[in-house]
């Protein structure tokens, strides 16, 4: 089988399997999501009916007396095409109202009815009804104002609706897969043949030609991919091989010639060596004879002694007196020969007499003949010398001869090498090598003496700005000055070393306690913080110091330094001029942090991070307005991780900036793809403060918009935290303004959590406010959160900013927000964050979600019913109050003066305020309602206090006030309608 067929079959096989698996997963996912959408819509409708019934029941009306509910249920079925039936049963399962009137009075005993009757909580089930059809049934229990279970709202839709939708989806998927498969297979075959198979065949033939030694044939492939590179490499290899073969042949001929020439040369050299060896043997014999002659012939030694350029003297080994000195010695020492002969060796050797006597004794006995001394010249200069000495006969007696070499320059060079190896070239302080040696010595002494050693790591704060502003020369002068101050501050036995840059290590020895070390370090901090004056410029630096104590920290020298370094980073993190003692627990946390940081860095490099997208919608008209890009980590072991579990690791690091750039690029790339599909969306990304303040931030945003040039800038939205904006206001305004000038939108996230003043808010260049989800989630239960949400909405409207609510967990949250004037929302009640590939399907499902799409219309209908019910309740209360006044009997209405105690008052300050409190007509009702309660109490007290006739005469006053009140309620009703 040919290569092309193999590649094609393997590729098509993988493609077919991928398409099949993908299609199966899409079908399963579609069925689940479509069913969820229908159930969500059904629950939304059910809760709407339940909400209406609950408010009617709160007025004390029995469930079976609510006329008109049949028509309401029929209307629900007619307006929602997927709903097959809607009904209301009592607590025993008897049908009270139903969209199918023939079922009224029917007693439901199916499993669903039994389940809801026993659990008394919202449920849904699939069941086979008495008519033989399979239904999805949604059941929501009803409770009266005393929380007594009184009945059930039941809605259902046929499972065949889902089946038909899935069948349609499967048919469409099969068609799409077959068409896609055929097109890809044909294109792939053509592509592989043109771009891979034909070029490979051509290269194979060219390689065979090279193997056969035919270098004239050439490949015509000039592409820039891997095959093109392979073609180029084969050409290069052919040329190289051809040249090498030519060179090898030429080298072979030259090598033969050289071997012949070299053979003759070796023969000649061998003859010369033979002759030289004979001459050397004779010279050695002569040298041996000369040596013997020198030792035995004083005359010959004297001649050599006088004529030698080496410094030579002879010494009496008994007294040390100089017996003879040659001319070279006269020149070197600066004395005349006569002067030298009057001197003792101790006059020029700096050793003591006893030491000199000992050294001469060693030379005399020939136990040693090589010595190092320091000799004093006539000028007073001390020089280092190397002396070769031994016994020799001189004038019939044995003396010591000394041949002297000056090694002063060599010693200086060795000392300089030692200084370079152990001391910092800039400051003269011990470097890393010497510091390590002294630390090891200090540890040994501490073990022996039982005291403490402190290893202190010091890093200068504020040095980099000085270096950047005034240059490296000024920076070096600052380091030299700091080094001098440190050396003057520590004690004599302590060591100050510079280990590079603006970092120093101080080894404090022989201390008794931590407090003693802290005192020394406090002095160090004080002297460093004193101003440094350089060329009339006053400079200031401070220091962050971390330290550890041995043997409390019982580690070796290297680990002690690392611990002090870690403690220094902790001190630096707390601000300037801080001292921190190494903490083992903190060390564990630092190691864990570094491991997590490294793992996260690896995750970024290995593409384990992805973006999920959470929809933002207009809850009023149902339009999808955009997506928020949210980071997720596809951890190979722990699964999908939310950003809260790992983003804090990157705070204020360069990796935060790199990741922020990646998010912006990836989000714009996805937005460009959606736009190509005809989807008009915005995408928002969250920007950290460290990234926002980076000098390259605006440039990168601009470059990314140029890269994805089909995306207009107003489709990109940057979300910044309110708390960040307050803390870094002065540093973030400019980059935000630059982004706004490009057209980029700015959203202030988590609004309400930062306690920002209106001054800050007014200065911030923001386009949209996002209400923090902590307030939105609890607004239905917590009046304070509700008040905060309402205030934020009113503030946004006052400043003419759009406002979006985060944390819309249910359709009830959406309804409440719409009543407050907030139309934009996002949250789990709308959609959870999802992969980019799921967004298109979700939008289709969202458009078919009748519960959300019809929310605004249902709010209008419910609002009218709601106000009419409130009017009825108030009329009933007035009638009861007038009856009590007329008969002078006890009132069933407790706390007559309390406007919150009646049914209307509870509605007015609760559900009514929640729905209509932002309307002007609503606020006008409060004062008149209080007046009615005050008058009722006054008339009732007159009636029961013996002034019944006066009370009855003033009832007309109450009726007039009530009529005015009802008129105001009608105005509210007109506004809503």
Image (tube, grey):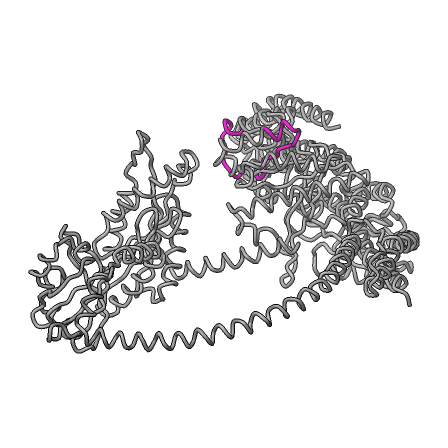
Residue 626 included in the magenta stretch of the image? no
The location of residue 515, given as percent across then percent down, is 24, 55
* Left or right, residue 46 beside residue 405: right
Q: Quadrant of residue 317?
A: bottom left
Looking at the image, which residue is at 12% across and 54% down? 336
Q: Nearer the viewer, residue 86 or 204?
A: 204
Q: Residue at x 65, y 56 (%)?
A: 606
Q: Residue at x 69, y 32 (%)?
A: 713
**Is residue 973 among the parts visible in the rendering?**
yes
For the question of whether residue 60 can be seen, the reply is no
Residue 159, above or below 652: below
- Residue 813 occupies which quadrant of the picture? top right
Front residue of this view, candidates 916 and 362: 362
**Magenta segment, which residues?**
738-761
- Image quarter where the C terminus lies is top right
Q: Quadrant of the N terminus?
A: bottom right
Q: Quadrant of residue 370?
A: bottom left
Within the magenta stretch, is there residue 754? yes
From the top left corner, tell me how far across and down residue 126 is, in percent.
Answer: 81, 59
Depth check: give the residue in front, 699 or 960.
699
Please say if 576 is above or below 953: below
x, y percentage for residue 743? 66, 29
Report the number of numbered marks: 0
Residue 152 placement (x, y as % from top left): 75, 52
């Amino acid at each position: 089988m040919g290569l092309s067929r193999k590649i094609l079959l393997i590729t098509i096989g993988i493609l077919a399997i991928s398409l099949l698996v993908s299609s199966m997963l899409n079908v399963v996912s579609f069925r689940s999501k479509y069913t969820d959408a229908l159930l969500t819509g059904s629950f939304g409708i059910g809760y709407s009916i339940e909400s209406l019934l609950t408010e009617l029941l709160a007025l004390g009306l029995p469930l079976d007396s609510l006329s008109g509910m049949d028509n309401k249920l029929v209307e629900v079925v007619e307006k929602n095409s997927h709903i097959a039936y809607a009904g209301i049963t009592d607590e025993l399962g008897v049908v009270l109202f139903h969209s199918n009137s023939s079922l009224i009075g029917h007693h439901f005993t199916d499993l669903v009815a039994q389940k809801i009757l026993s659990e008394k909580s919202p449920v849904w089930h699939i069941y086979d009804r008495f008519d033989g059809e399979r239904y999805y049934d949604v059941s929501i229990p009803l409770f009266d104002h005393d929380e007594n279970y009184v009945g059930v709202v039941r809605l259902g839709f046929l499972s065949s609706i889902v089946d038909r939708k899935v069948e349609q989806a499967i048919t469409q998927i099969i068609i799409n897969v077959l068409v896609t498969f055929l097109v890809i297979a044909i294109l792939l075959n053509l592509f592989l043949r043109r771009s891979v198979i034909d070029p490979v065949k051509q290269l194979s033939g060219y390689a065979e030609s090279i193997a056969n030694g035919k270098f004239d044939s050439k490949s015509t492939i000039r592409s820039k991919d891997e095959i093109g590179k392979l073609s180029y490499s084969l050409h290069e290899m052919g040329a190289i091989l051809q040249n090498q073969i030519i060179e090898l042949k030429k080298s072979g001929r030259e090598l033969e010639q050289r071997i012949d020439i070299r053979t003759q040369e070796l023969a000649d050299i061998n003859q010369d060596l033979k002759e030289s060896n004979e001459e050397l043997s004779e010279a050695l014999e002569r040298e041996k004879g000369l040596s013997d002659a020198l030792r035995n012939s004083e005359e010959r030694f004297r001649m050599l002694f006088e004529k030698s350029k080496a410094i030579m003297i002879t010494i009496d080994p008994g007294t040390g007196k100089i017996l003879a000195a040659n001319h070279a010695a006269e020149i070197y020492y600066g004395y005349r020969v006569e002067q030298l002969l009057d001197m003792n060796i101790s006059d020029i050797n700096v050793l003591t007499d006893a030491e000199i006597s000992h050294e001469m004794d060693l030379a005399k006995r020939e136990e040693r003949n090589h010595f190092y001394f320091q000799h004093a010249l006539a000028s007073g200069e001390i020089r280092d010398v190397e002396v070769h000495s031994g016994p020799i006969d001189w004038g019939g007696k044995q003396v010591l001869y000394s041949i002297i070499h000056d090694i002063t320059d060599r010693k200086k060079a060795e000392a300089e090498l030692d200084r370079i190896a152990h001391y910092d070239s800039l400051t003269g302080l011990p470097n890393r090598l010497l510091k390590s040696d002294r630390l090891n010595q200090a540890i040994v002494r501490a073990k022996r003496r039982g005291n403490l050693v402190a290893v202190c790591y010091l890093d200068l704060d504020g040095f980099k700005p000085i270096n950047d502003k005034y240059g490296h020369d000024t920076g070096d002068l600052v380091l030299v000055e700091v080094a001098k101050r440190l050396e003057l501050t520590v004690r004599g036995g302590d060591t100050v070393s510079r280990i590079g840059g603006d970092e120093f290590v101080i080894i404090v020895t022989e201390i008794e306690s931590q407090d003693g070390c802290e005192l020394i370090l406090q002095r160090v901090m004080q002297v460093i913080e004193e101003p440094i004056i350089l060329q009339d410029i006053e400079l200031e630096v401070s220091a962050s110091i971390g330290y550890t104590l041995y043997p409390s920290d019982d580690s070796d020298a290297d680990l002690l330094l690392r611990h002090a370094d870690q403690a220094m980073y902790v001190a630096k993190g707390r601000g300037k001029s801080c001292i921190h003692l190494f903490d083992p627990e903190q060390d564990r946390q630092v190691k864990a942090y570094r491991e997590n940081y490294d793992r996260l860095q690896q995750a970024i490099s290995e593409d384990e991070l992805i973006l999920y997208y959470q929809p933002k919608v207009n809850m009023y008209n149902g339009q999808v307005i955009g997506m928020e890009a949210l980071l997720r980590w596809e951890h190979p072991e722990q699964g999908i991780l939310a950003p809260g579990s790992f983003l804090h690791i990157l705070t204020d690091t360069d990796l935060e900036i790199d990741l922020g750039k990646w998010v912006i690029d990836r989000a714009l790339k996805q937005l460009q793809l959606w736009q190509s599909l005809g989807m008009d969306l915005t995408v928002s990304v969250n920007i950290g403060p460290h990234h926002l303040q980076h000098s390259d931030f605006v440039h990168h945003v601009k470059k990314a918009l140029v890269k994805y040039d089909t995306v207009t800038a107003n489709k990109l939205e940057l979300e910044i935290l309110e708390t960040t904006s307050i803390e870094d206001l002065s540093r973030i305004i400019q980059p935000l303004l630059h982004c706004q000038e490009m057209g980029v939108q700015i959203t202030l996230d988590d609004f309400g959590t930062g306690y920002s003043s209106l001054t800050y808010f007014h200065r911030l260049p923001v386009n949209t406010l996002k209400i923090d989800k902590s307030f939105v989630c609890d607004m239905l239960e917590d009046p304070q959160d509700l008040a905060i949400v309402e205030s934020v909405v009113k503030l946004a409207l006052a400043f003419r900013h759009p406002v979006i609510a985060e944390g819309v967990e249910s359709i009830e949250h959406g309804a409440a927000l719409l009543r407050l004037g907030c139309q934009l929302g996002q949250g789990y009640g709308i959609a959870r964050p999802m992969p980019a590939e799921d967004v298109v399907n979700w939008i289709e499902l969202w458009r078919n979600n009748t519960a959300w799409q019809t929310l605004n219309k249902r709010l209008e209908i419910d609002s009218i019913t709601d106000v009419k019910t409130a009017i009825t309740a108030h009329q009933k209360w007035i009638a009861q109050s007038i009856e009590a006044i007329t008969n002078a009997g006890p009132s069933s209405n407790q706390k007559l003066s309390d406007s919150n105690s009646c049914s209307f008052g509870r509605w007015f300050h609760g559900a009514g305020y929640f729905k209509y409190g932002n309307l002007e007509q609503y606020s006008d009702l409060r004062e008149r309602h209080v007046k009615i309660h005050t008058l009722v109490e006054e008339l009732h007290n007159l009636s029961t206090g013996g002034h019944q006739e006066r009370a009855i005469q003033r009832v007309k006053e109450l009726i007039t006030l009530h009529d005015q009140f009802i008129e105001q309620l009608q105005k509210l009703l007109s506004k809503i309608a």
